[in-house]
Image: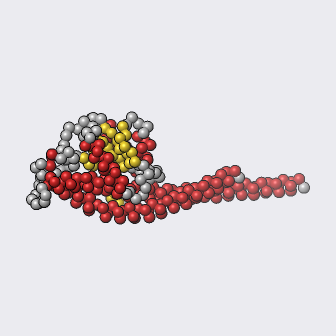
């Protein structure tokens, strides 16, 4: 009987967990729809901004601008964008391991700017220089946060504290797939012109003046897009993880129910045998 009570207790506990994971899956799916819409809406603008900035960076005097000029890389900054919460499968772990791998392979000193509590909790216990950190981002990254982060990154780069700034985040592909990747933010990357048709645009004022004006906006947009992509990827990973947990709970309940029925049947059989044995004993005595 104690075994039966233990199985019933486990079934009840797993059923409660199943209700929680099912609710979390529905919440994540609802938030994912909004996050996905923001990603699709912002991506064309971010791509066009990067294209225009890249073309302007090819102009003859563009290398005079500090945000464009390449220099010897003595120290690199990595901006890691992860979640504030767990229960998202391997989402946070994959990004943290990618960052750790880049830091290990880095041939020169490197610093870390962490966006997300999970990344801060992990790297705070490691011998890694944390330049800045941001936590409690929420499910809807605000443009003001992107502006603040972009301004901090530009200040770090312009002050000479670092010579290169890279973003590490998960690019959102679909509700079932995201790709952890590393993208350079500063200095600005110039597109390859080999094998492509070059168009001679006319800029007013001169290209360097236009580039100098849009570079801060370019950094803000790129950081904002990375935050949106990361949040959509996190929510999709959480939705998939909670769906998997709900299915696993149902399988465990099914297995435990079968074990419960077997144990109950064995207990009933044992009681019937005891009653029959007792009756036969009474007959023998009579």
Query: Which residue is rendered at x = 22% and y = 55% of the image?
Result: 214
Tell me: 273 left or right of 214. right
Query: Which residue is rendered at x = 26% and y = 62% of the image?
Result: 44
**Residue 248 in the image, given as x and y percentages of width and height:** 51, 56
Q: Quadrant of the C terminus?
A: bottom right
| Residue 30 visible at all | yes
**Residue 45 in the image, given as x and y percentages of width and height:** 26, 61
Query: Which residue is rendered at x = 71% and y = 58% of the image?
Result: 268
Q: How is the image coloured?
A: secondary structure
Seen in the picture, residue 22 relative to 215 is either above or below; the reply is: below
Query: Which residue is rendered at x = 32% and y = 53% of the image?
Result: 147
Tell me: 163 left or right of 128. left
**Residue 111 in the image, given as x and y percentages of width and height:** 33, 39
Q: Nearer the viewer, residue 211 or 121?
A: 211
Instruction: Tally the marks.
Output: 0
Tell me: 9 left or right of 201. right
**Residue 38 in the image, given as x and y percentages of width and height:** 35, 63
Q: Nearer the viewer, residue 217 or 235?
A: 217
Q: Nearer the viewer, residue 271 or 140?
A: 140
User: Residue 257 occupies which quadrant of the picture?
Assistant: bottom right
| Residue 94 visible at all | no
């Amino acid at each position: 009987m104690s075994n039966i009570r233990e199985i019933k207790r486990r079934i009840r506990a797993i059923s409660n967990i199943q209700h929680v994971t099912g609710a979390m899956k529905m919440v994540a799916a609802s938030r994912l729809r909004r996050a996905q819409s923001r990603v699709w809406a912002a991506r064309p603008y971010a791509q066009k901004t990067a294209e225009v900035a890249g073309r302007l960076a090819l102009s003859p005097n563009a290398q005079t601008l500090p945000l464009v000029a390449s220099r010897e890389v003595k120290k690199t900054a990595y901006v890691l964008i992860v979640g504030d919460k767990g229960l998202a499968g391997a989402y946070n772990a994959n990004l943290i391991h990618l960052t750790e791998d880049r830091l290990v392979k880095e041939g020169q000193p490197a610093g870390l700017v962490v966006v997300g509590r999970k990344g801060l909790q992990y790297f705070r216990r490691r011998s890694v220089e944390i330049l800045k950190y941001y936590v409690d981002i929420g499910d809807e990254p605000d443009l003001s946060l992107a502006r603040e982060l972009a301004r901090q990154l530009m200040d770090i780069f312009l002050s000479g504290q670092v010579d290169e700034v890279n973003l590490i985040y998960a690019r959102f592909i679909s509700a079932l797939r995201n790709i952890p990747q590393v993208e350079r933010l500063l200095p600005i990357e110039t597109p390859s012109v080999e094998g492509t048709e070059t168009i001679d645009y006319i800029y007013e004022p001169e290209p360097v003046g236009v580039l100098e004006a849009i570079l801060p906006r370019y950094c803000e947009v790129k950081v904002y897009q990375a935050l949106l992509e990361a949040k959509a990827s996190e929510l999709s990973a959480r939705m998939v993880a909670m769906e998997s947990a709900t299915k696993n709970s149902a399988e465990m309940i099914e297995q435990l129910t079968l074990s419960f029925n077997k144990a109950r049947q064995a207990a009933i059989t044992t009681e019937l045998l005891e009653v029959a044995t007792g009756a036969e004993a009474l007959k023998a005595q009579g």
